[in-house]
Image (cartoon, rainbow, N blue to C red):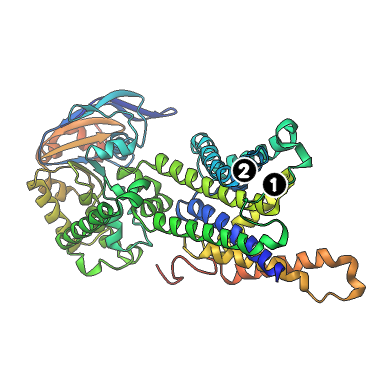
Amino acid sequence: MDYILHVLILALIYSIFAVSLNLELGYAGLYNFGHVAFFGIGAYISALLSRAGMPVEGAMLCAMAGAGIAGGLLAVPALRVTEDYFGIATLVFAEMFRLVCLNERWLTKGPMGLPGIPRPAWIARGVDGLPVYLILTALAAAGVFLFVRRLTGSPFGRALRVIREDEHIAQAFGKNVLLLKIKTIVTGSALAGLAGTLWAHYISYISPADFTLTETILVVLCVVLGGRGTHWGPVLGAFAVIFFGEAVRFLPIPHELHRYVAPLQGMVYGGILVLIVLKMPSGMIAEHRRNGA
Amino acid sequence: MLRVRNVTKSFGALMAVHDVSFELGDIGITGMVGPNGSGKSTLFHILTGFYRLDRGEIFFNRHAIANRPPHQISRLGVIRSFQQTRPLPFMSVRDNLIAVAPRQCGESIWPLFFSPTRVRRQERALREKADGVLDLLKLAPLADELAGRLSYGQQKLMELGRILMADPRLILLDEPTAGINPTMIRQLVAVLCRLCEEGIQIFLIEHNMPLVAQLCQHVFVMDSGELIFSGTSGNARRDPRVVEAYLGRESHAA
């Protein structure tokens, strides 16, 4: 039972993370390969502040703001280059963030990581707090979902789709493309920061090893697998990625093969994901019907 | 209204536009003709901010617009089309029109959450405006169709509709009738004439000479990056430099 709660919490946190990336990747067409950095910035800010004695709620808000500001700081220079190069710039940014965390020991304790990150005072420690933490995460996820749905279903989201489809048309019709993209990245980063802070206070220990390229790939996968540019796609994608990731633990692997359990699980997991992408190239929920134009 | 002075643009050794100066009056349809590669489209790109210019000045209603970013020039009412059609294929025809409308309060984040009524009211107004434009273009029956499914000619008309949504004061059209059938051309011409009567200035690049003669009060001819003629279309056909640009130099051998 506790295990199911745990998986649900993870899936919801990844839903928030994926929804925030979908705003950038799915709607604005910004291939941000460094999204994990903002998840990490949120986690680190929140962990540091709460360990220093700030109430967890306040630390979470600061973490979101910090991640949003960091997003703006990345966006302004990174948006000077386009498409592939933007992807490379964001990828490098995430790696820089990880290396800073690894090396600035006075602040982050380097590879030792930050242990003992407290939960909000009104949530019990250990497994007793799981149901309440699940409710907190679910409320946050619902809030983020509704917020992003309002954004993307509005003229703002429509302008982002115009930019995604044809940037020149957007410019020729007076859209401030740079400003819209910056707003998108700041918003997406702040929401990723929220996901990061929920994760940090849940897991209670973070280290630079938690914020590697693997996590970026995982969250991009959630979005692409679920369906870019759709409301429910990234949520479904996040649940699928987490669910299959956990489900392979229960594979009936014969005892003689016990030495190969982990690689076999990984192969089956990879195989399932590849199969989904092959069968549903535009995601489990497609933005446009396939016969559409 | 539009004043262009000594505009020069080169790509490496290629002089795409060389020392071009001209003025557009306040009303009417002006044509720009010239052989392929003579710099017409480059000039349009410069006027609308898509290319930076090397030298020269451009004024639109006394605003200096040279080297301003495209969206700022667009907001002054200088709206362009592109040579190839550029529909937003997965949006409906109506949404193609609504999406490009300028000054939408719903494109900022705060009003979405703090003054949703204002956003809703503007959306409704834009929808009505778009339907009006579609009526004018006789595209109303296709309003809910995906733009990617329209024929080439219908897409060209839809693009004109998008331009109308932007409250243009000067429209730059890059080969508006290329590749569409004569019925559609007549429809397009009728709309252009009507806009002209409403006081919107139109500046178009066109290879269809009879059409230019019929539509344009004034014609510019470009060749090899230079403006070689400015005057009425009748005179253009008799101008020796224009004839030479199109047909080559006469041989005077023996």
Q: Which mark is on residue B61?
A: none
Image quarter in which the C terminus of chain A is found: bottom left
Query: In terms of sequence position, does the residue under pointer 1 or pointer 2 come before the other?
Result: 2
Q: Quadrant of residue B1?
A: top left
Q: Quadrant of residue B12?
A: top left
Instruction: Compare residues A157 and A144 and report the one nearer the observer.
Output: A144
Q: Is residue B101 left or right of residue A165?
A: left
User: Where's residue A136, x and y in %?
Assistant: 57, 58
- Answer yes or no: is residue A131 visible: yes
Q: Is residue A40 left or right of residue B234?
A: right
Task: Please say if the residues under marks 1 and 2 sit with CB atoms less than 8 Å apart.
Answer: yes
User: Where's residue A242, x and y in %?
Assistant: 66, 64
User: Where's residue A113, x and y in %?
Assistant: 75, 42
Secondary structure under badge 1? loop
* Residue underneath mark 1: A117
Instruction: Compare residues A90 and A219 and report the one nearer the observer.
Output: A219
* Residue underneath mark 2: A46
Residue shown at the point (35%, 63%) measured from the top left? B148
Q: Is residue B146 above or below residue B213?
A: below
**Disc 2 crowd, CA 10 A, few/some/many (<14, 14-19, 20+):** many
- Answer yes or no: is residue B250 visible: no
Image quarter in which the N terminus of chain A is found: bottom right
Q: Is residue A221 above or below residue A181?
A: below
Q: Subunit of mark 1? A: A
Q: Amino acid at mark 1?
A: Ile
Residue shown at the point (71%, 68%) measured from the top left? A2
Q: Amino acid at mark 2?
A: Ser
Q: Subunit of mark 2? A: A
Count how many numbered circles sit on residues in the image: 2
Instruction: Compare residues A128 and A231 and report the one nearer the observer.
Output: A128
Secondary structure under badge 2? helix
